[in-house]
Amino acid sequence: MGSKIGAGIAAAVLAIPLLIGAQATGIVGQLFSSGSSAGSLTCTPDGAPTGSVPGMTAEQMGNAAVIVAIGKQRGVPEPGWMVAIAAALQESGLRNLSYGDRDSLGLFQQRPSMGWGSPAQLTTPAYAATTFFEHLQATPGWQQMSVTDAAQAVQRSGFPHAYAKHEDAARAIVAAVSGVRCEPAPAVTGPGNCDTIQVASPAAMAAINYACGQRKLPYLWGGTSPDTGFDCSGLTQAAYAAAGIALPRTSREQYAAGPHVPAGQPLAPGDLVFYATAGHVHHVGLYIGGGNMIDAPDVGQTIGIRPYHHPGDDYYGATRPSQRVVVDGGAN
């Protein structure tokens, strides 16, 4: 839980780069014409998506693609994607807003004061979509509800019937961004920031997504909560808890828990990287690709992105918790 490694690198909002930034000529035609890799997914055309919707900007379509990608990852059926898109259209116009009524933020105008998450989390589109779907899936009978009733069950808006007018637009947007078939890609080294993380497993993605949402929180020795701050192993423990994988509390125990990445094997985003002096492990970070990690470095510093290794440091080795088996909410 000790200290490690130099100055922070500024990072922007996490977005799963599934179908982002294409214009009216079509996302599939521009990005997937030869079956390319998009972030954590290998994607090939499946059907004939248009990739654009009249009146929708590339920013809006990109945010819609993040929502659909999260829905797919969580096993939410297509009607749930429409509910989420309709909600985001009403709440933010499918824009990742840094302002809103009272303390409302992000795509769904979720409120930190109501327990939805921290401001950094709620302005992370993948996190915001995840929390929306968590609440939707916890709503009994949502699949038998209308789009507007299901959205209202999650959002608890003062305007409960406002979502209905977005149903047709949500249907068109889902059709535009969901016609690409995606499968998990092999582990690859990503560009090393929270914009375009490339991961090989849902567990690694969930852990990185959580950690990215904690950026700028203060280091706190013994800290294990986003309400107060984290130390290094508190951050990695909480990140993998968000993925349903239980890790021990300290960096030394986390290293011992494995499974270890063999020396010389390339790291994959989601791996934990450890540092030791005379064999005594004292620090851990979460590798995100591109030679970078996200960590809670030391007293007086904040959680951020930094190079994981440089000549002369005390890098010790890595583990791959994403390969541990999840059983009954914990991992073996």
Image (cartoon, rainbow, N blue to C red):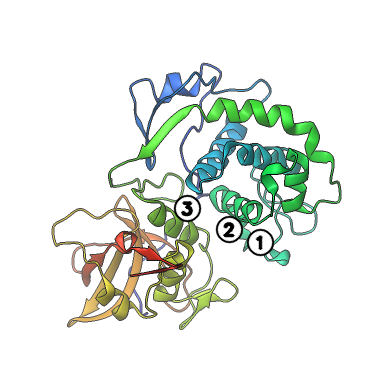
Residue at the spot of label 2: 121
Residue nearest the viewer, comparing 219 with 46: 46
Q: Is residue 23 above or below residue 83?
A: above
Residue located at (33% from left, 21% from top):
34
Element marked by disc 1:
loop
What label sits on residue 46 in the rendered view? none
Query: SS at mark 3?
Result: loop
Marks 2, 1: nearer the viewer: 1
Q: Amino acid at mark 1?
A: Trp
The amino acid on which the numbered mark 3 sits, given as a three-letter code, is: Ala
- In the picture, which quadrant includes the C terminus? bottom left
Residue type, numbered disc 2: Gln
In the rendered image, which quarter contains the N terminus?
Answer: bottom left
Vertical side of 191 occupied by 309: above or below: below
Q: Earlier in the sequence, mark 3 or mark 1?
A: 3
**Residues marked 3 and 1 touching at CB (< 8 Å):** no
Q: What's the CA distance linking mark 3 and mark 1?
A: 22 Å
Q: Which mark is residue 11?
A: 3
Say above or below: 228 vs 216: below
Kindly tell me whether residue 48 is visible in this rendering.
yes
> Quarter of the image holding residue 283?
bottom left
Q: Which mark is residue 116?
A: 1
Q: Quadrant of residue 170?
A: top right
Q: Nearer the viewer, mark 3 or mark 2?
A: 2
Q: Nearer the viewer, residue 59 or 35?
A: 35
The earlier-in-sequence mark between 3 and 2 is 3
Dot 2 alpha-carbon crowd within 10 angstroms: few under 14, some 14 to 19, many 20 or more: many
- Please tell me which residue is depicted at 68% across the width and 23% down the height of the picture: 55
